[in-house]
Amino acid sequence: MSDLDWVRGVAHELIRVHLDASWSFDFDHAKKRAGLCNYTERRITVSRYLAQRHSDHEVHQTLLHEVAHAMAGHAEGHGPEWRRIAREIGYVGGATHHGEVAAEFARWVGSCPNGHEFLRFRRPSSRTASCARCSRRFDRRYLITWRERTEAERLAS
């Protein structure tokens, strides 16, 4: 679990070393993604919730990932130039975050007839959906039913 003051200090140092003074850092309230590089606002953000769950190493890697995006530019995405820059500054991870999500904040839980569970942070659309684990195509036999979780259920997850 990373201390948020430590994260802020590391972020400011990485920005100072690799970017210019027009870039800033802040925490955001994302529950599924670890970090974000906002090119328009020239700001790098890290999820406050996930930073408190992940190790210092994981958070440092997230910051390096986002700084590499800022250095490579928006058009590069996770392309070869971004990968080169990311490696050069010390990033060793992949293109996406595969770590834990802040599941206790998921307000909605869905399940298929075979018991597969799905979490949503926003109200699911009114469109019917079927379980992709049970069938690659839409299949009414595997419809997902949604319900809103109680506060106690969310805190217990």
Image (cartoon, grey):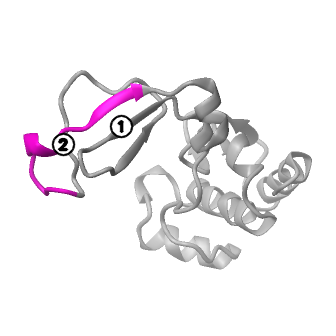
> Which one is in front, 62 or 23?
62
Q: Which residues are magenta?
A: 134-147
Q: In the rendering, at what x and y percent does residue 144 appear?
A: 25, 38
Q: Position of residue 64 (x, y in %)?
A: 68, 63
* Quadrant in the picture for the C terminus: top right
Label 1 to label 2, Cα distance in Å? 10 Å
Magenta segment includes 29: no
Instruction: Name the N-terminal-most of marks 1 and 2.
Output: 1
Q: What residue lies at 22% left-to-right and 48% top-to-bottom?
A: 131
Give amino acid for label 2: Ser
Q: For residue 130, what is the image quadrant?
A: top left
* Residue 110 appearing in the image: yes
Where 109 falls versus 98 (above or below)? above
- 157 above or below 53? above
Q: Quadrant of the N terminus?
A: bottom right
What residue does disc 2 label?
A: 130
Which residue does the numbered mark 1 point to in the structure image? 110
In the foreground, 89 or 154: 154
Secondary structure beneath label 1: strand
Residue visible at 66% across and 60% down? 62
Classify residue 67 as left or right of residue 133: right
